[in-house]
Amino acid sequence: MTGTTDDITARPGIADRLSRMIALPTVSAELDQRGMAPFDAFITLIRELYPLVHEHLELTRYTDLGLMFRWKGRRAAADGPLVLMAHFDVVPVDESDPWTHPPFEGRIEGGWVYGRGTLDDKGPLIVILEAVENLLAAGFRPARDVCLSFGGNEETYGAAAREIAASFRDRGEIPWLVLDEGGAVVDAPLPFVSGEAAMIGVAEKGVLTLRLSTRGEGGHASAPPTMTAVRRIARAVDRLDARTFRPRTPQAISRMLGAFASRATGPARPLYRALAAAPWLAGRVFALLGGETAAFVRTTVAATMASGGTAANVLPSQASATVNLRIAIGETVEATVARVRRRIADRRVEITVIEGDDPSPESPVDGPAFAALARAVHTAYPDADPVPYIMMQASDSRHFHRFSPAVYRFAPLRMSAAQRAGIHGVDERVEITSLQQGERFHRALIQGLE
């Protein structure tokens, strides 16, 4: 069977199935405390909820937390598969936060599903499984192989996804398209820009975690030396301010501005056009605006942890700080560390790389893979225009972008600003109608494969 998306009826009950997933606290950062039980229960649950997926797709396990389902297509495997990615682990919950409903209850109320993971990333995961199950029920077989790559430790550096990606690379299998979490369908994405946009990440920034450490004279705090260990680390952190890295505008941001210029009103239209045509100017303007806007065009630096000392009246003999950087497109881990070293300008501060991944290259927006995404967007969200952008967070797809040229980051769910604030925050929730549209997106994407 081939057919169209309209020929297939989605089965009811998607909210109930997501609710059951949310009720399992698959918190990868708490694996040592909670153990494997929630993760094993989740894997058992999807076998129960998606029997056709397990009957017709080949499942391969990678580590304890990696699942890879392969759906054989009609064409030769050498043509390259569609890889749909998601993760089923979630971040911890601060029990003191004022959630409207318990974060692991999976409450369904007023057309919404509430709970940790509804957006990141069990909601995006379930719409993949729903689409495949519905297509299998209708007797559909895709044109090319479809692989479902699900990891259970994305929030803790993604070892499962790394193993899955390595299996493709080692056998020389280059995916035709890789799609992971990232952008979403948003309303009024920039000031004076109306309507909905499907923000598709064509690249993601690199991640670098550094430890700054130093030693100094210990002793009694009543007679401190001029430069203590704590003060030296504080000075080093202070030197890593917003001016540490120069702005540079990736091509995707210029294209994003060009797309929004056609939908902008008033003086914003010529402004967006000018910024799209002059990347150097866009970089400076975005940097001046600060915050999330500035993060599009430059490497960001944030001190996230500090330590040193054992008592209030004792000078510590050593001190350290942990610094997290998100590396701009076009830069490297090596060059970023060198820049940090020059900026700190203190040989007594030791810099250690804890974790480092270069940013991804930009995937094309003028090829068949992006066109397939655009068609699926228009099927599920007829009023939303696909727009490329740069993803600032790290995703499991970074393990594919080193050898696969078409890697994109888009969760086909509608997300308001308030919803996006709930990701890793309080009152994370997803609208049921958006889940249904997300299933429709994946169904259209799979049916439209060439």
Image: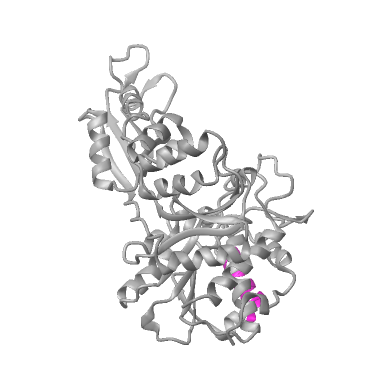
- Residue at 42 percent of width and 49 percent of height: 255
Q: Residue furthest right?
A: 110
Front in this rendered view, residue 315 or 321: 321
- Residue at 50 percent of width and 39 percent of height: 269
Q: Tell me if residue 9 can be seen.
A: yes
Residue 208: x %, y % from top left: 35, 46
Q: Magenta stretch: give its range.
A: 38-51
Relative height, residue 192 to residue 137 (above, below)? above
Front in this rendered view, residue 105 or 165: 165
Q: Tell me if residue 117 can be seen.
A: no
- Residue at 43 percent of width and 24 percent of height: 311
Displayed quadrant of residue 49: bottom right
Residue 434 lies left or right of residue 389; in this view the side is right
Front in this rendered view, residue 47 or 109: 109
Front in this rendered view, residue 271 or 173: 271
Residue 42 located within the stretch drawn in magenta:
yes
- Residue at 55 percent of width and 64 percent of height: 36
